[in-house]
Amino acid sequence: MAEVIDLQRRKSKERRIAEGRARRRAQAVASSLSCGLCPRRCAHCGMAVEYSAPPPADAPYPFCEVCQEEYEAFRRREQGGEPEAFWHTDEWAEAWRTWLAHMRAGAAFRSSPAFLKLMEEHLE
């Protein structure tokens, strides 16, 4: 004989699964967008930042010493300077431009009404 399926229970279970999945996705979005914002971690490589002096005022994000040097070399190259190392190629510069655009896009999304709603609804 055929088994009777409780549709209400099945629908309730599917709803709980969907809500759990939405909550995990919201948490993943929030945590991925908060990466690079900790002032004690390098926004570029993630290493711990130890400042012996205050970071340069023109640095858009907290950088470790090495990434700060690379960022400054990138800025000099963007202003018409010569490559300072053999790896300072067009692709290297494009990687920096793309990373900076990614960070700006993340900041814009974090200040959007959609992101604020996401935080209110799923990260209580």
Image (cartoon, rainbow, N blue to C red):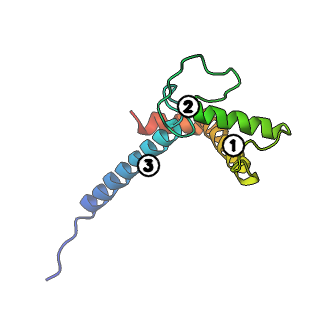
**Residue furthest bottom in the image:** 1
Among the two numbered marks 3 and 1 on one chain, the one whose residue lies closer to the N terminus: 3
**Disc 3 versus disc 2: nearer the observer:** 2
Q: Secondary structure at mark 1?
A: helix
Q: Secondary structure at mark 3?
A: helix
Instruction: Answer above or below: position of 57 versus 109.
Output: above
Mark-to-mark CA distance, 3 and 1: 23 Å
Measuring 67% from the left and 27% from the top, which residue is drawn there? 59
Quarter-of-image position of residue 53 = top right
Q: Give left or right: position of 65 versus 18.
A: right
Give the left or right position of residue 54, taking residue 96 as reference. left
Pointer 3: what residue? 25
Q: Residue furthest right?
A: 80
Query: In the displayed image of the protein, which residue is found farthest to the left?
Result: 1
Q: Which residue is mark 1?
A: 101
List x then y, in percent, for residue 5: 22, 69
Crowding at label 1, few (<14), some or many (≥20) Cα neighbours within 10 Å? few
In the rendered image, which residue does mark 2 sit on?
64
Q: Position of residue 86 (x, y in %)?
A: 71, 50
What is the CA distance from the residue labelled 1 to the residue labelled 2? Answer: 19 Å
